[in-house]
Amino acid sequence: MTATAPSAPPQDIPHPAREDLDLTTVLHALSDPVRLEIVVGLAAGDERACGSFDVAVTKSTCTHHFRVLREAGLIRQRHQGTSRLNSLRRDDLEARFPGLLGTILQAAA
Amino acid sequence: MTATAPSAPPQDIPHPAREDLDLTTVLHALSDPVRLEIVVGLAAGDERACGSFDVAVTKSTCTHHFRVLREAGLIRQRHQGTSRLNSLRRDDLEARFPGLLGTILQAAA
DNA sequence: GGTCTACTACGATGGGCGTCGTACGATAAC
DNA sequence: GTTATCGTACGACGCCCATCGTAGTAGACC
């Protein structure tokens, strides 16, 4: 039966390690207006669910953008009920690319 | 005729104005490994001709990348004989996006 | 003039990306 | 259990982009 085998925890969302963050990948992730807007929104507050952003795209596209941001190492995602909470990986980004996130956020403001 | 008339455009190469620089366009221009390498090379020295970079692409592709960088407002190009000299638009970038170029160059080093 | 060099213009191509619609799974509330 | 909400997965489509080859232009040099 059901070897439903939860061999892995339900929250096994893959995230890149801090040392694996790549500059061009990060820059590419931020070079899309929608994604940059999401990052700016995340920087303003704390954790936010995907649906709390009112971007001009459909849900599927939003899922795509959040995945790009996560795989680039910009955000961290974790499940909470039916929602998925997103937060900025400030510490990792600051350790890997000092000052980068700050200047970009300032330039985007 | 020492008045070389620098204000007169000996070059009809179009460059975007400082206030027209767009953040996502700049980030996209820098999100390509070849272009980032070019910018790093330009930051290291002064003016350099297109051919002085030994990137792993053909000359046509190189021309394409230089145009992307120029249209994004990252570099300035001017003719000199058969060559085209490229230089970083440090001042414009610093005025428009303070600290951005510096942190990216530091992260790319 | 003739030739060489440096770069561009143009066309073609293959792949990646942003976008969407629909179907599906998971959780919460009734 | 039923329903509603939230987000994902998958497939599809169109467009942009990085790459190349070839031909062409402009200046420098003989």
Image: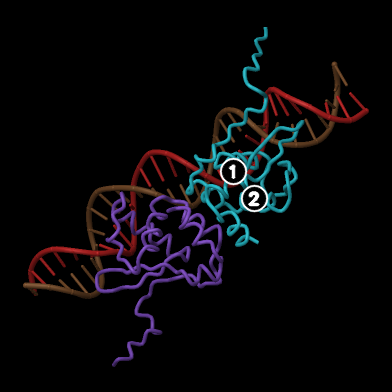
Chain colours: A cyan, B purple, C red, D brown
Question: Which quadrant holds the N terminus of chain A?
Answer: top right
* Residue D24, x across and y down, in percent: 24, 64
Secondary-structure class at tag 1: helix
Q: Which residue is drawn at 57% across and 50% down?
A: A94
Q: Are marks 2 and 1 in contact (CB under 8 Å)?
A: yes
Res. B51 image quadrant: bottom left
Q: Is residue A27 above or below residue A16?
A: below
Q: Position of residue C19 (x, y in %)?
A: 61, 45
Considering the numbered disc 2 on the image, is that residue within a helix, a strand or a loop?
helix
- Please tell me which residue is depicted at 54% across the width and 37% down the height of the picture: A17
Subunit that carries the residue with mark 1? A
| Marked residue chain, label 2 | A
Identify residue type, mark 2. Val
Q: Residue at x 29, y 52 (%)?
A: B58
Residue projecting furthest to the top? A1
Q: Which mark is residue A69?
A: 1
Residue at 40 percent of width and 84 percent of height: B7
Above or below: residue B12 compared with residue B66: below
Report the residue marked by disc 2: A39
Query: Mark 2 or mark 1: which comes first in sequence?
Result: 2
Left/right placement of residue B57 relative to residue D4 reads left
Q: Which amino acid does label 1 sit on?
A: Leu
Above or below for A107 versus A42: below
Report whether A107 appears left or right of B51. right
Instruction: Give a yes or no on whether discs 2 and 1 share a subunit.
Output: yes
Check disc 2: other Cα within 10 Å, few if <14, some if 14-19, many if 20+.
many
Q: How crowded is mark 1: few (under 14 residues within 10 Å), some or many (20 or more)?
A: many
Q: Where is residue A42 in the image (x, y as percent from the top left)?
A: 69, 49
Q: Which of B104 and D7 is in front in this view?
A: B104
* Horizontal relation, residue A66 to residue B72: left or right: right
